[in-house]
Image (cartoon, rainbow, N blue to C red):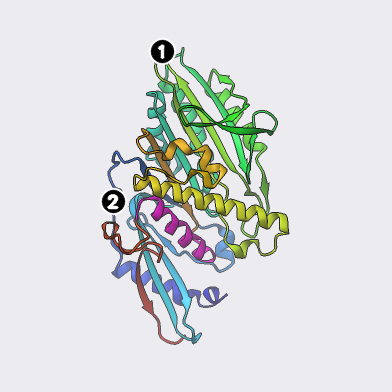
């Protein structure tokens, strides 16, 4: 309420900061690291503006017409303890690539998933994960990636290529086959160490329409529930894995993971006991994922994949020495009401990016658990 009440003063302070202190950044060139982390900012919704919310996320350089950068700022508007003075904390985070609100789905695809499709066609393994707060555009972005990846995949392979897929839902501690009416399946580890669902329906597909049809059918069965943030929040992790074999070459795979919407405890305050337990399981699995990605970024020998069914399933992404390219796209809402959510998303994304959350590890600079590089500006009495 205080943010909305003092909206004009906060907006003026943000604009002043952007005019005098903001520096534009260019996206980093794609490297050969095992993990890339990108961020996408969604546009403000009309209903948010009508509710007197204001924009608190800035992607430097994109407001003048650009679409790509390597940093993102959160303008955290707060009242001083005396409830008279106002404070703006400007948190700066750096990533491999940041998409402003003017970036369309084609641009996002070209700079994220496109290279992973090429790796799968070349007989390698690659994974793309979509992470973010409920209502931040996460599932919207992943839906666009499904369509573009499928069409480009078929454009890149010869007519005799064998393409198949499975689609499973990970909910709590259970796994369900969404191409077999949501039937339960087990996760089993092969002699090579890879974890696979069994038994699972894995049909071969002959064209893009067939594969997209399977994905949309699976998505239509996915568990959703209203939350304190969104009327149709995804309450499970959706995992689509596409296999590609060309002639006698090695089998490649592309795994697309739409993670369940992350929630803070306040958002589940009105939920019943079952829903609160579900939210706790989702947040626990996302924390386990963060720990495993961080372990991979640090080249750890034994990542903690047994902490959750999600990380067990994605085990091959985290094992040291595996040539498995992993990409994470974090989505953030620009609305002032979502400030804490967006900060939380970017703090976790920084850790997944290998940026240290330990002040003693100086090679990654300042601690991002504290909110990136922070500049604080105080206003006079309102």
Is residue 207 depicted above or below 264 in this figure?
above
Q: Quarter of the image holding residue 376?
A: bottom left
Q: Nearer the viewer, mark 2 or mark 1?
A: 1
Q: Earlier in the sequence, mark 2 or mark 1?
A: 2
Q: Which residues are magenta?
A: 334-355
Q: How many marks?
A: 2
Query: How far from the left and from the top, in percent, is residue 264?
Result: 57, 61
Q: Is residue 64 above or below residue 337?
A: above
- Residue 26, position in %: x, y? 28, 51
Residue 248 is marked as: 1
* Local SS, label 2: loop
Residue tagged 2: 26
The image quadrant of residue 58 is bottom left
Res. 110 visible in picture: yes
Looking at this view, is 34 or 129 the one in front? 34
Q: What residue lies at 48% left-to-right and 60% top-to-bottom?
A: 344
C-alpha distance separating marks 2 and 1: 42 Å
């Amino acid at each position: 309420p205080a943010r909305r009440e003092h909206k004009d003063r906060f907006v003026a302070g943000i604009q002043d900061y952007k005019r005098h202190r903001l520096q534009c950044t260019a996206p980093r060139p794609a490297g050969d690291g095992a993990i890339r982390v990108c961020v996408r900012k969604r546009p403000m919704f009309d209903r948010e503006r009508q509710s007197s919310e204001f924009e608190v996320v800035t992607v430097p350089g994109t407001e003048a017409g650009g679409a790509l950068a390597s940093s993102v700022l959160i303008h955290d508007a707060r009242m001083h303890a005396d409830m008279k003075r106002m404070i703006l904390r400007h948190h700066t985070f750096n990533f491999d690539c940041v998409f402003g609100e003017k970036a369309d789905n084609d641009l996002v695809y070209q700079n994220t998933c496109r290279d992973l499709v090429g790796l799968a066609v070349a007989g390698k393994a690659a994974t793309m994960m979509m992470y973010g707060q409920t209502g931040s555009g996460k599932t919207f972005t992943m839906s666009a990636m499904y369509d573009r990846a499928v069409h480009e995949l078929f454009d890149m392979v010869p007519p005799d290529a064998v393409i198949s897929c499975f689609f499973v839902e990970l909910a709590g501690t259970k796994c369900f086959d969404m191409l077999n009416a949501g039937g339960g399946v087990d996760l089993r580890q092969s002699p090579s160490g890879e974890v696979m669902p069994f038994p699972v329906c894995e049909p071969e597909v002959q064209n893009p329409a067939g594969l997209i049809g399977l994905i949309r059918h699976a998505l239509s069965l996915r568990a959703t529930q209203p939350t304190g943030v969104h009327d149709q929040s995804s309450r499970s992790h959706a995992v689509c894995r596409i296999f590609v074999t060309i002639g006698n070459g090695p089998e490649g795979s592309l795994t697309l993971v739409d993670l369940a919407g992350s929630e803070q405890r306040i958002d589940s305050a009105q939920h019943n006991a079952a829903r609160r337990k579900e939210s706790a399981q989702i947040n626990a699995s996302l924390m386990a994922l963060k720990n495993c990605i961080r372990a991979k970024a640090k080249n750890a020998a034994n990542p903690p994949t047994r902490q959750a069914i999600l990380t067990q399933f994605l085990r091959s992404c985290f094992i040291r020495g595996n040539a498995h390219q992993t990409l994470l796209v974090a989505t953030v809402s620009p609305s002032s009401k979502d400030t804490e959510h967006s900060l939380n998303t970017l703090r976790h994304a920084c850790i997944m990016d290998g940026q240290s959350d330990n002040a003693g590890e100086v090679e990654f600079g300042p601690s991002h658990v504290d909110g990136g590089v922070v500049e604080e500006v105080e206003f006079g009495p309102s």
